[in-house]
Amino acid sequence: MSNGALTRKLGFWAALALAVGTTIGSGIFVSTGDVAKAAGLPSISILAWIIGGVIAIPQVMVLAELSTAYPENGSGYVYLNKAGWRPLAFLYGWATFWALDPPSISIMALAIVTYLATFFPFFAGIAGKLLGVAIILFITSIHYRSVKEGGRFQVIITAIKIIPFLIVIVLGLMYMNYDHFSYTPPPGAGSTSLIGGVSATTWAYTGMAAICFMAGEIRNPGKVLPKALISSVLIVLSLYTLLAVCITGLMPFDKLMGSSAAVSDAVSYIPGLSGIASSFVAITAIIVILGSLSSCIMFQPRLEYAMAKDGLFFRRFAKVHPKYETPSFSIVAQVTYACILVFFSDLTALLGYFTLIQLVINILDFAAVYKCRKREDYKPIYRMPLWRITTILAILGAAWLAWGTFTWAPFQGMIAALIVIVTGLPVYYYWEKKYGRSRDQGGNPNIVA
């Protein structure tokens, strides 16, 4: 039975599946063509995928150190809080709950329905939205009742979602046309750009930090967290690079650059699969997005749980189910909000606008290591090599992603950030006054559910 706190029940494989499952999402189906278009040459396109993955390595190293120093639920919220940037830590969680996490759940559920509708046209309109809600509730029932069983489900669905990509890779290696790698741009074509190609891969490598949100529920976190974080980057990097090589080898590069569904188009060039390419990719997409949806429903409520325990969110979010030992209220509140959002439109643009402030705060997540290393309680089991250089590289990678998001919608991003600040700071100071705070920066006022 629960004593009012979450317990450590997840092992290495669940942690790895959570990181990989969150990272590999629906974006890979379109980003391969985007990277090719931005890069301009096959060799540069493939190199961009490699560099994009390498850029993520310093970031997970910083997270590995921070998470083993403070193996608690909450990820960036915890690290910002420990660094003494408590208002920023709150704004991070405030924006995440209201404008990022539940909308992302809704978007993924609707994406699954969209692919299902290719087989069952009935699931269009209101029927599709109701199905989206049903999918969310089904996945939620798994993670609500048991974190251990939820971890097992995540391992299974992540393993299944990788299989279709492995099929494409194996068949791609068998049937690729090596002449496609010698593509030369025609006179007057756009310039090649390694930086542009790498920029187009950046979003595909985000998601590994998901396990840090559940650091307080992972057994032997000092060993498991660094191993799972670094392994997840290497797995995703290898998978993406091999997939990029095979897609490039399967279809003419000029067609790849203009493709908005590169995986589907590439599969159509495989003998025997051309007639079922769209169905194959639709089924793959359903599995892939289902895995990402499961990951998000699993880890996202832990942020609000951590904030509520710290006195900076509605206190009921800190409630732990006495039998299932899960953050029951936080889970229910988040998916209820997500289910409501299913019936709204244009969530994708909204999500993009509010992502900017989270990305800017993510930069401070990595910078927090400078402040945390000065704390007496900072005793990480894992210490990253060349920590100053590694941290600078992590910050630069995060800044690159934030800049790309800012240039996409600068005005909307600034308005979204202003909304978060204007709505969030009064609430922050209210809760600080009501519940108080420890005199030690980043301490816990011992708020209990």
Image: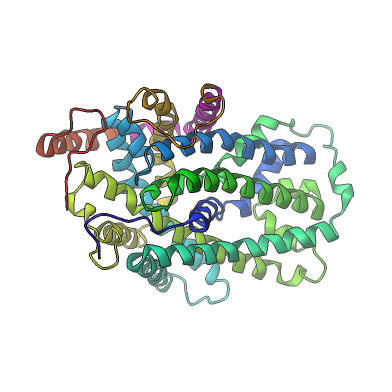
| In this picture, residue 333 sits left or right of residue 181 | left
Residue 59: percent from left, percent from top: 52, 35
Q: Is residue 67 above or below residue 414?
A: below
Quadrant in the picture for residue 170? bottom right
Give the position of the N terminus as an image quadrant: bottom left
Quadrant in the picture for residue 371? top left
181 or 174, nearer to the observer: 174
| In this picture, residue 426 sits left or right of residue 267 | left
355 or 395, nearer to the observer: 395
Residue 182: percent from left, percent from top: 87, 42
Q: Is residue 287 magenta?
A: no
Q: Is residue 400 magenta?
A: yes
| Residue 419 visible in the displayed image | no
Identify the residue at horizontal 25%, vertical 28% (top origin): 441
Identify the residue at horizontal 51%, vertical 26% (top origin): 391
Residue 92: percent from left, percent from top: 33, 38
Q: Is residue 323 above or below residue 172?
A: below
- Furthest toward the left, the residue is 434
Q: Which residues are magenta?
A: 389-417
| Residue 229 visible in the displayed image | yes
